[in-house]
Image (tube, grey):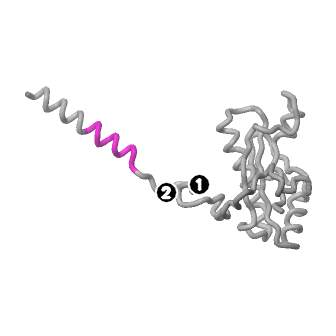
Amino acid sequence: MRFSRALLAILLLSILCGAAGCANKTGGGQGAGSTGDYVNGTPLPERHEGTSFFGGNVERDRFQPIYFDFDSQAVRSSETGKIQQIVEFMKSGSSQIIIAGFTDERGTAEYNRGLGDRRAGGVRESLISRGVDGGRIQTVSFGMEMPAAAGHNESAWAKNRRAEIGVIK
């Protein structure tokens, strides 16, 4: 009898602990899907139907790629001139852009997809901090899926750690 009560008590505790582990957590950082699409506190705009970074309605060769250090989403100070060109373009009209984040081949596909997303978000926040309306900027990550340079060396990897800007037509 005592054995069955002890077994019942253990069973109830394990159910309660399991339920507590599945409880809805609050707090922490915001990300897509939690309370909306946010990058560093600035809401992402709604996706435009039919907008694809590689689609015919996106001009991808207007701006030079923005390059990143290994495993970093921080915009290099050497890339500030490129950022400023985009800022001036955005302030001179009403165009919308899409920023695509890319990585080199090192790391898992999942990690690199997240890093590409953080890189695109870093460029987005850099533009917003310079006065560009965040509602006109979309982001996407391709991770390591579409390298700009073939090769398995630092020279190729450096060219693949980038964010590209597309102007939505």
Percent x, y for residue 50? 73, 57
C-alpha gap between disc 2 and disc 1: 11 Å
**Callout 2: few (<14), some (14-19), or many (20+) C-alpha neighbours within 10 Å?**
few
The image shows residue 92, relative to residue 150, as above or below, that is below
Q: Quadrant of residue 81?
A: bottom right
Q: Is residue 8 left or right of residue 84?
A: left
Q: Secondary structure at mark 1?
A: loop
Percent x, y for residue 29? 56, 55
Quadrant showing the N terminus: top left
> Residue at the location (73% across, 41% down)?
143
**Callout 1: few (<14), some (14-19), or many (20+) C-alpha neighbours within 10 Å?**
some
The image shows residue 94, relative to residue 25, as above or below, that is below
Label disc, if present, on residue 31 of the rendered structure? 1
Q: Quadrant of residue 92?
A: bottom right
Extent of the magenta region: 13-23
Q: Amino acid at mark 2?
A: Gly
> Residue at the location (81% across, 61% down)?
168
Q: Amino acid at mark 1?
A: Gly
Which residue is identified by label 2? 27
Q: Main secondary structure of the magenta part?
A: helix
> Residue at the location (64% across, 64% down)?
43
Is residue 80 inside the magenta stretch? no
Percent x, y for residue 61? 91, 53
The image shows residue 143, relative to residue 126, as above or below, that is above
Percent x, y for residue 73? 74, 48
